Amino acid sequence: MSVALGPTLGGDLRQACGLQHRLAPSGACLCSAAPPARRAGPQQNRPSRTILATTSCGSLRNSTRVSAAVLEQAAPQQTQAKGEDWESFNAEFQTSSPLQVVDWALERFKGEIGIAFSGAEDVALVEYAHLTGRPYRVFSLDTGRLNAETYQLFQKVEDHYGIRIEYTFPDAQETMDLVREKGMFSFYKDGHQECCRIRKVRPLRRHLGGLKAWITGQRKDQSPGTRAEIPVVQVDPAFEGLDGGAGSLIKFNPLADMSSAEVWNFLRVMGVPTNDLHQRGFVSIGCEPCTIPVLPHQHEREGRWAWEDATAKECGLHSGNIKLGGGADGAGADSQRDLWANGSAVEALSKQQLESLVHSQGQRDKDTLVVLYAPWCPFSQAMEPSYEQLAAEIGNDLRIAKFQADTDDARPFASSELGLKTFPTIVLLPKSGGPYIKYGSERRDVQTLKMWLRTVASA
């Protein structure tokens, strides 16, 4: 079966595919891409940008050749870099496949754009770049604490694509000072931010200073609290590029609207290298001391920094995607608005009321679920709709409550009595009495909260 490809690559492949399968939100048929005709040799030497695209899932029979013009028809037209409206570009990219986004980005920022590489999503990005036939650069952060399997993956990728990854390393003196002062595993005691800042964020900042754009493997479903609103393309809100100053670095997230299943379907069909740790229960893989396998139905980011509360699972590389508002101190007008305010089904507890519930010697009047929150906290803001829905749906069976815990008198109480470390923290005070039960997941959607309550609540 042959097919004439039209303006969007994914749409025609979808029509040609008779199998039932899930498509990417862009409409691209992820199981229909085929490897390029050439695998060996440096990718910079490929003279042609023509690639193979199959017309049935995973099959190479009756393939048709797709020219570069086809890839570019659905992408935004090039304009001058200064003053470009990247929000409008992002809207236009909503109908483009990841392949089209990568192709456009590589053409737009020739030689001054790099693919950030560390995990499975990034192998997909390298594969997409390879499929375009354009020259591309790949860089990676070697923190000095990676798993052996991750280093092996680096070599496999270099051999598979005939490329050399641009490795960047943390400053030796800074790393030595940290280890000498606090030891090799200080992050277990005082959090991962300091170590990540030295081993990851600062090296990345230095490397991005030599680029005008970068491509990441972020997906919206990777972390509900921090990545739910990432765009396909944006002005990088956290780092500066080659020209310096605000707006000097463009960030592409071609996989933003893809799910983990869709990424892995693509990787399997393409037959590309992946980290051997994925076959042992590891999903999101970082440094060796900070990564563990996850259990079935756990969210992938729960395998990162597992000793910490599951509310801020970012190392700082993509912290700019966290919505903090527009004020000079990182908090905008929304920071002054209380959450679950007038007319809310969520019950507001005073400190006296919460103390009474916590110190109750006998049975409480009902199970009480309490969120310890701060109105300015983006993670607290993000869970406002789902927690409100939870209160509306099951508020008659148990008390769904809130306690603002960021004030001078409230925070010490919440920390000592309810284990508050980060915002938001969710705890259940059982009707039967006894100590609180802390909710440990960063998944705060209604269904997940309901499932958890069914396992611990009396009602």
Image (spheres, rainbow, N blue to C red):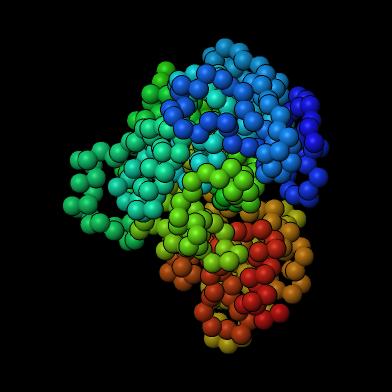
Q: Who is closer to the viewer here, 370 or 303?
A: 303
Q: If the image is split into quadrants, where does the N terminus sit?
A: top right
Q: Who is closer to the viewer here, 233 or 457?
A: 233
Is 400 drawn above or below residue 32 in the view shown?
A: below
- Image-quadrant location for residue 324: top right
Q: How many marks?
A: 0
Is 261 drawn above or below residue 298 in the view shown?
A: above
Residue under the point 50% across and 41% down: 122
Is 343 drawn above or below residue 139 in the view shown?
A: below
Residue under the point 79% across and 26% down: 4
Pinpoint residue 250: horizontal percent, then vertical percent.
52, 26
- Image-quadrant location for residue 3: top right
Q: Who is closer to the viewer here, 46 or 77?
A: 46
Pinpoint residue 428: horizontal percent, then vertical percent.
59, 72
Instruction: Using residue 440 as the reference point, say whether residue 167 is left or right of it.
Output: left
- Can residue 304 be seen from the camera position used here? no
